[in-house]
Image (cartoon, coloured by chain):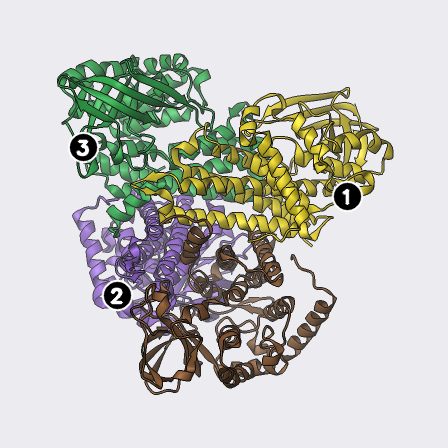
Chain colours: A brown, B purple, C green, D yellow
């Protein structure tokens, strides 16, 4: 809406669009739950072979060194075909961290397998007692000379039951104040003895998460990333890019496209009351798109995004949830079906889309945490 | 705010509450999800044996001859327990059958329906503006399509709304009738409804136009009361969670932003509950405008409270293994069934005097 | 909506309605700002002579000993003609307090003049530093043997500049804990030397309030109401009745009536989008009416209302403000006029009604205070 | 989020901000409330002398030949200072006049308008669905009624929208024209507009249909930017108050419920500001759908933020003597002027490609 592709970008978009339409399997389009690993990974590997799995990585690590504009084009074109969610913990989170903080050996060992899709990574940050208050995590890694011995419980590992390795934050100094000064960042092979994985199904009936129990798990010292007790900075250093991903208007626009298809199919499109609600939603998403492209401009200009970019997440997640509510409304008496609704041949999972969206205001720093950040760090309010 | 109930009303409320608790509570609902029918015919029959489907039935027909307040008390407990049986449906069906002039029909069906042995569900037409009428009576046969009959796959019969608005009627159709096709659709709350296709089905007229609206309004009322039960249990569970979950070294219920959210949810709940009981106090026949207003309000508030409940639970609230999501899902079905808020705002304006 | 008059009440309503239509001056109808004292008080006195100024007072104190139903009928019928706000601090607040806590002398001196309208009372509770946190008030009354010497500042006295007397809360024990245990309730003649009154105009351009500066003001000991240091209970004992008044759906319904008149006059009444919004508003007010009549039933049954009745104020004030927002919307390009709009002959003050409604969530315990009360006293949340 | 501005743009912003501060800031606005015209012609002329009305005017006509970003920067400062002068109106009028093919008219009017000596305000028709067209051109004379011309009582002339939508035009009418009646209406923000009655008024056509929409869209943009200024100053003032006001022995800004409210208001403000500058970045001509969307968003958010500002100030915020209410009142006018949110949601849908 606020962005026109330049000549080179337009050509890239055309290339991406035609390649995707030929190569993205029909059965993987429009899925709201994550497909199983066996079904999904060939697609991951196809994208990888095309060189598009890690557009933001530098070329010498196997990425395409893409501009921000190209990264967004890829994201938009994938969304246009409702491509499935991929396991992106490795590509989006660990990769950039290793590129910045990893030893040469760590880079050599892990980066190629992330790119190729041979190794799937899980993110081990949250614990049952440390969600919003992440700094209070208690999984502890004891120094045993040549290795760490890790004990604790991690939870909310997206795709954890399908993962091969996990990067995690662990406590290496229990006396440190502030608490986050005693946390280290390390990598663990999930085949190591002592690790038990329990899958967790979400309310949209998607086996999205896992819980990881770590009992006397041996982690070699060379798996420490960054300095001992310096893990907090390692984990938080590269969040701006992630915020752009979660605040993209694309997620809401995909829902709007489905609303419009359903409304066209069932005739509601001509109802002035529906039109007014749709207008309100689209205008709100347009404002969100403005924030998004504003942020893109800041990052593309090499400037820091700043803590007030938390407002983007608040606005974006509100819009997403509002969109899924209108999707339910436009479904009329079918607003509680788990069966996909038919919009002139296109099947639409209305209840699943609605339920999946409930996560938006909880994960990636809940809306309450975002408001705390804004109140304290941006507005400078006391207490 | 305190409900001014009689001792008998309190006993009714307690006995229903106890029955569902003894049957297994929400755990039972969870275990029945996705199973054929999604409910337990034995529990349904037990409710029938205790007379609960006869709340509105005259004493001369063996009913309890009580009123809407008692319907509300029962349906709130149904909502709190997430009981999956077709209870609102049966109360409505029993009421329709007692109002029917067709004595023969009453003899055949009524006793079994009110007793809970036979499941007959009302299947109303989609009231959305522009939605096609459900079916048409041609001679004494029904033709057409009905988008939504609750529990259709296991029901023994239906009270089907037919015809255009002004000439609408409710007709009884047995589930084994020739020409009746049923396609079962899984609902988000773990139960099923069915799409009915009627192809020259022989049917028996049970209620005329006025009777259709009265039955529909009663169903709206029962659904609204059930929604109050759903949001009240979800809110209780959430307040309890706020008092036990710790973050940042404190109970999260001590954070003012969460306190205020819980207070706003309480206001939603209290307003919906007062609304149900004030409408109940006006007795039968229900005003159609009021029934639609009530459905809008209770549906919207229940969705708000149950969504808020998940948000306040955080990540655990987003899992299937935690019960809190079940309340949101039931609220989704109940606010959709019989027409969503948009439909009922329109009906409210059209029906106003 | 949830209440039908019984036979006697119906007759009373007819009597009230016909008397009001004959006796309420046309010029006082539909006013959103308070008329001046000289213009208003003849109307107060006319109501008083008719015996309807203090319907809820017992007959032996000059009231009509009306049932709650009759009180509400009077309120509804006054609202139906958009009768002006009256100075009700004496009738609604002080009167019931004196009837319960006053000495025979206090009753004899003050009650008749409240009824007759000869004395207008102001309520002296809030202070510049003690608003939501009323218990921290600092206006102090020192015991001088036969009198108190009062020093301090009171603010937000409704109609204070037109008042003759003030009832107030003052600190008589500065060491007391909790703080509200050192507060007393007393009466002061505003002609006493040392009192300076400053009028305050509100955002709707209505000279609604005053601020009172008290410098060495002599208050005779016989003006203490209730026990020394027992003022907190005196002031808070009779709030349930007041809550019913502020939570009445009547205030929002009056705005709805104006919305409907304007919409009929300008044609918006036929717009489906407007109809949908009006439906949403009316349904919300209907739910509020249900709460109100539920509360009436509780009080009429002689039961205490309970702290969860705070929900009524939250719901009621939200509805009132939503109604005034729809009033602005229905006014179209005239939504910022201070001139009254014409709705087929009936003049409607849209911006003033909107601005006046901003007070609803601030006064009588702000919405934030109501939520605190609900969280702590009803839900039992910690902290 | 940081605006990426050039040094020149920052200087423009600072100089406008300084000018209004030196003129007396909000105190000046307060003192002009209800006075004839409600603004200061001298300040208006000073803005003209500094070239501010020529931001969009080509250099060859003596303008600054800048863009919408600069318009936004100026209008935001206008909003922050609650400057009562007809600034958006004059920027639009100057732009319309430079676009006009009528060289003679340009010579007569343009210099004086852009210089700030002559006040000419655009007076658009009410766009509400069903609202009557403003007037009709009969021969070369105008007849009809126009509901709203800002500052009409003191303006020197008007650019009046006439005719039905497809044949609309903007016509210049001097305020001393024969047959022109002006009824002044006090606005809630202390200024006035006028209702115009045209009875065979001789007028001169300045812009055709496309020109009307372009001028209208530019006015929407300027109003939206001014709304951003209004809400940003109100929000700053509120955050400051939260840091100084004590209750319950603490700064009220330490209460989490108020913190979260302030954070939500910040999100409203940031979204509106980003929206204005992203639209500005697209340059002229404005998309009508985008201009309407922008007006809806900035109007709604400004009302929300200024209402919230009053709530967070508490009782003092409800007084006329505190400045915070002035921001709400300006937001009320700006969100109403040129059509409210309901009107622009409809236009947005109609104008979408």
Q: Is residue D348 above or below residue A62?
A: above
Q: Is residue D173 above or below residue A331?
A: above
Q: Nearer the viewer, residue C31 or C25?
A: C31
* Residue at horizontal 79 percent and vertical 43 percent from the top: D58
Determine contact: label 1, label 3, CB under 8 Å. no
* Residue at horizontal 63 percent and vertical 42 percent from the top: D13
Q: Is residue B220 left or right of residue B51?
A: right
Secondary structure category for the residue under label 2: helix
* Badge 1 density bin: few <14, some 14–19, many ≥20, Cα 10 Å: few
Q: Is residue A193 above or below residue A19?
A: below
**Marking on residue B25:** 2
Q: Is residue A276 visible?
A: no
Chain ID for label 3? C
Could you tell me how far apart the alpha carbons at marks 3 and 2 are, in whole angstroms?
A: 51 Å
Chain ID for label 2? B
* Badge 3 density bin: few <14, some 14–19, many ≥20, Cα 10 Å: many
In percent of width and height, residue A331 lies at 51, 60
Could you tell me how far apart the alpha carbons at marks 2 and 1 are, in whole angstroms?
A: 67 Å
Quadrant, the N terminus of chain C: top left
Q: Nearer the viewer, residue C348 or B224?
A: C348
Q: Is residue C219 left or right of residue A273?
A: left
Q: On the image, numbered disc 3 is attached to which residue?
A: C182
In percent of width and height, residue A188 lies at 40, 82
Task: Nearest to the eye among marks 3 and 2: give it.
Answer: 3
Q: On the image, numbered disc 1 is attached to which residue?
A: D210
Query: Are the numbered discs 3 and 2 placed on the same chain, yes or no?
Result: no
């Amino acid at each position: 809406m606020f962005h026109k592709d330049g000549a080179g970008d337009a050509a890239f978009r055309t290339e991406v669009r035609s390649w995707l339409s030929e190569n993205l399997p029909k059965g993987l389009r429009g899925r709201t739950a994550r497909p199983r690993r066996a079904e999904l990974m060939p697609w991951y590997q196809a994208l990888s072979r095309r060189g598009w799995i890690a557009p933001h990585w530098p070329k010498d690590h196997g990425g395409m060194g893409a501009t921000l504009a190209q990264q967004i084009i890829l994201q938009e074109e994938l969304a246009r075909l409702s491509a499935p969610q991929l396991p992106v913990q490795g590509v989006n989170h660990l990769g950039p961290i290793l590129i910045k903080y990893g030893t040469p050996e760590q880079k050599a060992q892990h980066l190629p397998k992330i790119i190729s899709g041979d190794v799937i990574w899980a993110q081990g940050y949250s614990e049952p007692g440390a969600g919003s208050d992440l700094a209070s995590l208690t999984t502890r890694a004891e120094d045993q000379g040549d290795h760490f011995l890790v004990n604790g419980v991690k939870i909310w590992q997206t795709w954890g039951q399908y993962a091969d390795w996990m990067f995690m934050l662990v406590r290496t100094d229990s006396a440190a104040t502030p608490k986050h000064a005693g946390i280290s960042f390390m990598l663990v092979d999930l085949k190591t003895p002592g690790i038990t994985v329990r899958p967790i199904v979400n309310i949209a009936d998607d086996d999205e998460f896992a819980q990881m129990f770590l009992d006397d798990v041996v982690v070699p010292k060379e798996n420490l990333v960054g300095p001992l007790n310096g893990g907090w900075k390692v984990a938080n250093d590269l969040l701006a890019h992630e915020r752009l991903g979660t605040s993209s208007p694309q997620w809401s626009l995909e829902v709007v496209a489905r609303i419009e298809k359903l409304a066209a199919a069932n005739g509601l499109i001509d109802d002035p009351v529906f039109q007014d609600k749709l207008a309100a939603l689209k205008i709100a998403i347009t404002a969100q798109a403005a924030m998004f492209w504003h942020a893109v401009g800041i990052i593309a200009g090499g400037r820091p995004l700043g803590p007030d970019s938390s407002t983007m997440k608040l606005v974006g997640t509100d819009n997403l949830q509002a969109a899924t509510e209108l999707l339910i409304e436009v479904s009329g008496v079918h607003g509680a079906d788990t069966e996909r609704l038919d919009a002139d041949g296109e099947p639409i999972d209305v209840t699943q889309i609605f339920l999946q969206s409930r996560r938006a205001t909880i994960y990636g720093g809940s809306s309450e945490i975002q408001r705390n950040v804004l109140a304290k760090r941006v507005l400078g309010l006391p207490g | 705010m305190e409900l001014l109930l009689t001792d008998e009303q309190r006993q009714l409320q307690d006995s229903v509450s106890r029955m569902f608790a003894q049957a297994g509570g929400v755990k039972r609902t969870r275990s029945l999800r996705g199973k054929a029918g999604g409910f337990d015919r034995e529990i349904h029959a037990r409710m029938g044996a205790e007379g609960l489907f006869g709340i509105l039935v005259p004493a001369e027909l063996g009913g309890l001859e009580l009123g809407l307040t008692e319907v509300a008390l029962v349906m709130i407990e149904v909502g709190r327990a997430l009981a999956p049986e077709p209870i609102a449906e049966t109360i409505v069906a029993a009421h329709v059958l007692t109002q029917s002039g067709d004595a023969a029909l009453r003899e055949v069906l009524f006793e079994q329906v009110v007793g809970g042995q036979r499941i007959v569900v009302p299947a109303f037409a989609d009231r959305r503006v522009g939605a096609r009428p459900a079916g048409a009576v041609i001679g004494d046969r029904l033709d057409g399509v009905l988008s939504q009959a609750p529990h259709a796959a296991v029901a023994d019969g239906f009270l089907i709304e037919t015809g255009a608005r002004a000439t609408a009627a409710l007709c009884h159709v047995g589930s084994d009738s020739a020409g009746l096709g049923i396609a079962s659709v899984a609902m988000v709350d773990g139960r099923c409804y069915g799409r009915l296709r009627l192809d020259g089905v022989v049917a028996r007229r049970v209620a005329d136009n006025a009777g259709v609206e009265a039955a529909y309004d009663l169903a709206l009322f029962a659904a609204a009361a059930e929604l109050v039960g759903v949001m009240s249990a979800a809110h209780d569970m959430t307040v309890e969670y706020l008092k036990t979950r710790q973050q940042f070294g404190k109970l999260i219920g001590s954070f003012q932003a969460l306190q205020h959210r819980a207070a706003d949810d309480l206001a939603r709940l209290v307003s919906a509950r007062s609304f149900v009981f004030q409408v109940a106090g006006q007795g039968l026949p229900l005003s159609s405008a009021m029934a639609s207003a009530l459905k809008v309000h209770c549906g919207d508030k229940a969705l708000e409270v149950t969504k808020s409940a998940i948000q306040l639970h955080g990540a655990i609230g987003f899992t299937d293994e935690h019960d809190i999501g079940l309340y949101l899902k039931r609220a989704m079905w109940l606010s959709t069934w019989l027409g969503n808020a948009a439909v009922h705002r329109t009906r409210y304006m059209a029906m106003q005097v």
